[in-house]
């Protein structure tokens, strides 16, 4: 067991409200994809809303009702990459343009956390802001520019 885990956050602006016909397939696929994540090697935890099934009820920006939020924790970058790009998740990811508007700013961040820590919405949004403002670095990075886990997780 390592002393650090990888946190990830991604946000996206949906093309219509969740209860619209345009989002019906996306909403219907949520239980399957969340179960796949939960059972994937290296999965640790995922944030859920008050309903307890997924995070579709979380709004990181109270002024933007179409901005969805996803945050999870994994044992490693490789475990997250395997789930994201080498599982049935890719089938759903390939349809993202049907459901989400193209974002021009960074919409994802990865960062190392002490094992056992559970990120908050504010913490996750701060990491996206770090990538947007400074580009990838050891405190917030992307799949394209990953940073190795630090030795000893003394601080977040």
Image: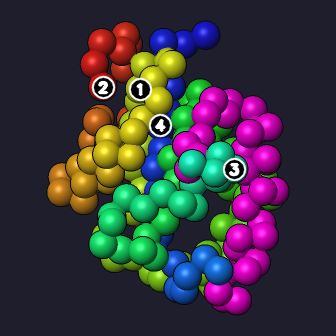
Give the residue number, with chain letter if any, for mark 2: 156
Q: Is residue 148 visible?
A: no
Pointer 3: what residue?
53
Q: Is residue 83 rendered to the left or right of residue 135?
A: right
Q: Secondary structure at mark 4?
A: strand
Disc on the earlier residue, 1 or 2: 1
Q: Mark 4 vs mark 1: which is more N-terminal?
A: 4
Please state if 87 lies on the left or on the right of 105 as rendered. right
SS assignment at label 3: loop
Q: Where's the C terminus, which quadrant?
A: top left
Q: Is residue 24 magenta?
A: yes
In this view, the mark in front (3 or 4): 3
Report the Cα–Cα distance between label 3 and label 4: 19 Å
Question: Can you give x and y, in whole percent of width and height, for residue 26 in the image?
Answer: 70, 73
Label 3 or label 4, whichever comes before in sequence order: 4
- Residue segment shown in magenta: 20-49
Res. 7 mark? 4
The residue sitting at 74% across, 39% down in the picture is: 38
Residue placed most toward the observer, 21 or 2: 21
User: Seen in the image, is 99 located left or right of residue 71?
Assistant: right
Identify the residue position indicated by label 1 in the image: 113
Q: CA distance from mark 3 to mark 1?
A: 24 Å
Is tag 3's residue or tag 1's residue first in the polypeptide sequence? 3
Q: Main secondary structure of the magenta part?
A: helix
Quadrant (top left, top right, bottom left, bottom right) of the N terminus: top right
Whether pointer 4 and pointer 1 mark residues with C-beta atoms closer than 8 Å, the reply is yes
Decide if residue 85 is in sight here. yes
């Amino acid at each position: 067991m390592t002393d650090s885990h990888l946190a990830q956050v991604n946000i996206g602006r949906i093309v219509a409200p969740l209860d619209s016909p345009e989002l019906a397939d996306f909403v219907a696929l949520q239980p399957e994809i969340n179960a796949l994540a939960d059972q994937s090697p290296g999965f640790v935890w995922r944030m859920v809303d008050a309903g307890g099934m997924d995070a579709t009820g979380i709004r990181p920006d109270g002024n933007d009702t179409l901005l969805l939020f996803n945050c999870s924790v994994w044992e490693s970058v490789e475990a997250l990459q395997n789930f994201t790009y080498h599982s049935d998740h890719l089938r759903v990811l390939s349809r993202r343009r049907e459901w989400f508007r193209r974002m021009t700013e960074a919409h994802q961040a990865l960062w190392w956390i002490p094992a056992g820590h559970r990120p908050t919405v504010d913490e996750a949004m701060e990491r996206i802001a770090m990538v947007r403002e400074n580009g990838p670095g050891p405190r917030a990075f992307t799949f394209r520019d990953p940073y190795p886990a630090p030795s000893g997780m003394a601080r977040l």
